[in-house]
């Protein structure tokens, strides 16, 4: 097995191991890990915000240790112009780095899509990013103190009495959903304490057809099968999601440094979109994949049932092709230098 997969297995030593092990403490399967030689990881998750300074303060002050690694103005980027349907687009951006992944805040100078509704819990679209933290840093309370709004129960919910993890969904300053997971490290009784007190655990896609979307990502990532649970329902989940009588299917893939979560609320079917969500609309707007060969990955996208929406062009010093999955979620296929600020190689040996 190649070195990258060894790094992925090593990630299970830390905080992630707590959530993946079964009640019988069997070793977790790695079938859901990307086996692709072409896709290294996730460079960053993009998020469109209305006020860059306010958004930076909101996230930095809520997650202790979230680091600003770059402030940059994106302009004269024809690939973003074409995606946005505007000429001369100017985007102010800030890259925030967690221990294992990055969130790119993006404020569009000209934005005619501010009235587009935020993606709800049941989607469709990029629904939330999950931050998993040591409960000692009190991230949930800090999010609320910094202006976050609760969605479900204002008290965090422990879903499984055997796992010392509490969950909550909140909305940020633009009503974009954030999931927070508080882990009681002492109660977890890990052989070794986690190296860091926070990480971005996953980006979640809510869909009306989880079978189609899971098959797409299984083919794209060349994974054997997703980690998956069907017919999930409980009053505790209702309390987190803020929806009564919820019943859903969930599946997960691991893409190098970050997980991809898929969820379909069978009990609350999402409203179908009339077109793709504008990149300028407030909320998560792209998953930037770190690839070794953008042309080869674009062929995989098409073969798996996605579409290519841009030619190969330069962005952040690396060549990128943009694509959409079967739900219309925007994927960047970027060839980034390992030395680049944006590269997922920054996190290859990072233990949670």
Image (spheres, rainbow, N blue to C red):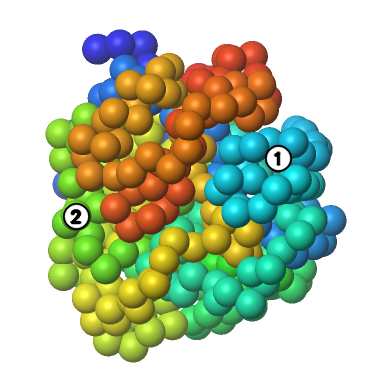
Residue 173 spot, x, y in % from top left: 71, 70
Q: Which mark is residue 178?
A: none
x 50%, y 55%: residue: 130
x 60%, y 64%: residue: 281
Of labels 1 and 2, earlier in sequence is 1
Residue at the top extreme?
Answer: 2
Between residue 282 and residue 232, name the one nearer to us: 282
Between residue 178 and residue 88, name the one nearer to us: 88
State the residue position of label 2.
212
Between residue 49 and residue 327, name the one nearer to us: 327
Residue 190 spot, x, y in % from top left: 42, 38
Residue at the front extreme?
Answer: 87
Viewer-nearest of discs 1 and 2: 2
Residue 23 spot, x, y in % from top left: 21, 51
State the residue position of label 1.
95
Image height check: is 317 above or below 213? Answer: above
Q: Is residue 148 left or right of residue 36?
A: right
x 22%, y 63%: residue: 209
Between residue 3 and residue 23, name the one nearer to us: 3
Residue 19 seen from this side: no
Residue 265 seen from this side: yes
Image height check: is 263 above or below 170? Answer: above
Residue 87 spot, x, y in % from top left: 70, 48
Q: Is residue 129 left or right of residue 256?
A: right
x 74%, y 54%: residue: 107
Q: Quadrant of the N terminus?
A: top left
């Amino acid at each position: 097995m190649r070195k990258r997969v060894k790094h992925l297995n090593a990630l299970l030593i830390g905080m992630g191991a707590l959530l993946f092990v079964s009640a019988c403490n069997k070793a977790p399967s790695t079938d859901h890990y990307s086996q692709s030689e072409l896709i290294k990881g996730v460079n960053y998750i993009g998020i469109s915000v209305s006020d860059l300074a306010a958004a930076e303060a909101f996230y930095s002050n809520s997650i202790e240790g979230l680091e600003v690694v770059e402030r940059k103005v994106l302009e004269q980027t024809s690939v973003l112009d074409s995606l946005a349907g505007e000429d001369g687009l100017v985007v102010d951006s800030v890259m925030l780095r967690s221990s294992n992944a990055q969130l790119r805040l993006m404020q569009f100078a000209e934005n005619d899509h501010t009235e587009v509704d935020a993606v709800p819990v049941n989607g469709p679209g990029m629904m939330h990013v999950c931050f998993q933290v040591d409960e000692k840093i009190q991230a949930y309370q800090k999010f609320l103190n910094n202006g976050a709004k609760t969605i479900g129960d204002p008290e965090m919910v422990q879903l499984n009495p055997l796992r010392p993890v509490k969950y909550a969904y909140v909305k940020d300053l633009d009503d974009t959903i954030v999931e927070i997971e508080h882990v009681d490290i002492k109660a977890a009784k890990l052989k070794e304490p986690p190296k860091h007190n926070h990480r971005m655990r996953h980006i979640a896609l809510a869909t009306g057809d989880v079978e189609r979307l899971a098959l797409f990502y299984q083919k794209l990532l060349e994974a054997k099968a997703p980690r998956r649970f069907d017919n999930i329902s409980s009053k505790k989940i209702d309390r987190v999601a803020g929806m009564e009588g919820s019943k859903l299917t969930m599946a997960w893939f691991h893409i190098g440094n970050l997980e991809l979560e898929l969820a379909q609320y069978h009990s609350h079917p999402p409203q179908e979109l009339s077109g793709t969500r504008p990149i300028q609309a407030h909320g998560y707007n792209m998953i930037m994949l770190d690839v070794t060969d953008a042309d080869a990955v674009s062929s995989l996208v098409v073969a798996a049932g996605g579409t290519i929406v841009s030619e190969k062009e330069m962005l952040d010093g690396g060549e990128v092709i943009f694509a959409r999955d079967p739900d219309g979620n925007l994927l960047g296929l970027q060839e980034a230098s390992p030395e680049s600020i944006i590269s997922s190689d920054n996190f290859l040996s990072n233990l949670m």
